[in-house]
Image (cartoon, helix red, strand yellow):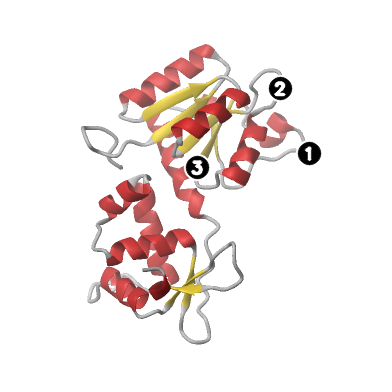
Amino acid sequence: MPSTGGAGEFRTKVLVVEDEEFTRTILTDSLIASGMRVRSAVSVAEALDVLLEFEPNAVVTDLHLGPGPDGVDLLERLNRDLPWVGQVVLTSHASVQVALGVNRRIPERAVYLVKSRITSLGDVEEAIFDSITRTTADEPSGEDFPDDRFELSASQGEVLRLMSEGLSNAAIAARRETTLRSTESLVARTFATLGLSNDPSTNARVLAVRMWLQGQVVIRDRTSTTPRTGSDQS
């Protein structure tokens, strides 16, 4: 469980979007009590205003938000403009099809949470942390290049760069303004992409940094067709 409270510690930031006052208040107050920083909104328009100023790590939204744009519209906007923000769908419907109809879908990386199945606040917290972890789901498959270089996503490359500076996972989480849990998951996937196993006789962290410094890592720049090596990032 990541650190979420205490002076100077990282606190997960969550935006709750819910038009029902009772649910919104209970959820917001509970998450604040757990140590998170929480803001709330009652509509998509209000949520978009809060997003720009608050910059949350995750958004928890109901699907039905009264007249106007709904939760799916908000999630589609997040997918397009803020793909690093975790998405949690909070709904009364156990079936996505019943909730949305046959012609609409929620993004695949969103965590679907049915209100009637929530047994404790821990269920919501777990969904939030899971959604933040899923923001790196678009990372490359890890196929190695012919010259023994490995392609990593920009987020994986950033993690390796911070490792090369000697930062711990907790320090990396704070620097990237994400949770320790999601950082640990990203680090583990980065090691797997580099083909580094959990062999107790080796130190995967040291080997990964060595590969980075020796230029064996290629970072795929989404704005360019030319990949960059790890040594080009410093």
Mark 2 neighbour class, 10 Å CA radius: few under 14, some 14 to 19, many 20 or more: few
Q: Report the residue marked by disc 3.
A: 85
Q: Does any portion of residue 195 appear in the rendered image?
A: no
CA gap, disc 3 to disc 1?
25 Å
Q: Assess whether mark 2 and mark 1 are in contact (beta carbons under 8 angstroms).
A: no
Residue at figure coordinates x 57%, y 30% from the top left: 48
Q: Report the residue marked by disc 1.
A: 103
When the figure is inspected, residue 171 is found, relative to residue 158, above or below; the finding is above
Q: Residue 68 carries which label?
A: 2
Name the residue at the top extreme: 22
Q: Position of residue 62 (x, y in %)?
A: 58, 26
Q: Earlier in the sequence, mark 1 or mark 2?
A: 2
Mark 1 neighbour class, 10 Å CA radius: few under 14, some 14 to 19, many 20 or more: few
Q: Where is residue 181 in the image (x, y as percent from the top left)?
A: 35, 48
Q: What residue type is labelled 1?
A: Asn
Residue at figure coordinates x 45%, y 36% from the top left: 56
| Numbered disc 2: secondary structure | loop
**Which residue is more in the foreground, 210 or 205?**
210
Q: Is residue 142 left or right of residue 81?
A: left
